[in-house]
Image (cartoon, rainbow, N blue to C red):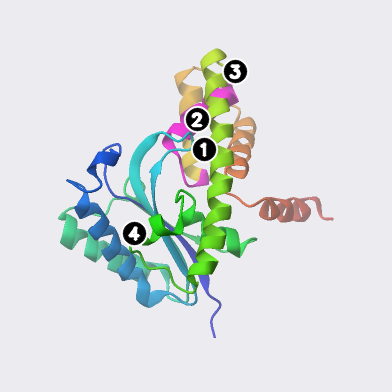
Amino acid sequence: MPRPEFMKTRITLDQEIWDPEQENKSKRWMFNFAKSMVEVVKPYIYTKCSAGFEFKSKTGDWCKPHLHIHFDTITPRDSIVKQLRRVWKEQMDEPFKVKTVWTMKEEHYLNDEVKFFRYAWKQYESLEALKKHDLVQHGYSDAQIEEHRAVAHQVWLESREYARAKADKYEDDTGTIYDRCCKVLDEINPLTIRDINGVILDVYIKEKKPINLRTIDGYTLCYALTNGIVDKERVMDRAEQRLGI
């Protein structure tokens, strides 16, 4: 039996900042479309799947609405992406754009499976709010979902307060170049090491700073670690290999 892979999928559903007044009006199509995207994934789920919307940024401001789908599977990534592309094109009548619209990342090294699956539920204030969107949640009872949702939401609330305090600090003090890089990164919300590195390079180029690749790589790794894009255990394993301990 092949070992399952953990898939982390994010799909941006609209290019406009979310307006809560639209939920029961002009944006109903978005919820129906999101359900169809989760249904595409459903046949490929191995044991578990969690799905949920996000409408707010790290600081709690309204942002472009996007959908998270986290699941484990023994189906190759490309086969699933092919089906997602097909449904997207059928319903949206436009190409499935990489990065600006979606990303599906394989988590080869997963340190915390519970954290991985509860992530999609972090902005929901209650189980009832989550169930209202009627997305596929596979492998969990309602009681288990509520337990994990409550933890994820509390973690998100705490990180939101930290992000707000950081944003206030930026308003009072421009800080170091790393602070300025973080400000841009927080606004863009990149999902990969390459994207983070590119944004930091853009800041250096814009400010006409000398390019020190070792420093930029250090900033990239620091941001990725503090925002959960790279797992600390993975970095520690690499360090152990590099030092030959």
- Where is residue 131? Give x, y as percent: 38, 62
**Does residue 109 show up?**
no
Give the amino acid type for the residue marked by disc 4 in the picture.
Answer: Lys
Q: What element carries label 3?
A: loop
CA distance separating discs 1 and 2: 6 Å
Q: What element carries label 4?
A: helix
Q: Are marks 1 and 4 in contact (CB under 8 Å)?
A: no
Q: Closer to the N terminus: mark 3 or mark 2?
A: 3
- Circle number at residue 201: 2
**Does residue 105 show up?**
yes
CA distance separating discs 1 and 4: 38 Å
- Image point (54%, 86%), residue name: 1
Front-most of residues 131 and 203? 131
* Mark 1 neighbour class, 10 Å CA radius: few under 14, some 14 to 19, many 20 or more: many
Q: Are marks 1 and 2 in contact (CB under 8 Å)?
A: yes
CA distance separating discs 2 and 4: 42 Å
Q: What are the residue bounds of the magenta stretch? A: 175-193
Q: Does the magenta stretch include residue 187?
A: yes
Residue bearing the label numbered 3: 175
Give the amino acid type for the residue marked by disc 3 in the picture.
Answer: Gly
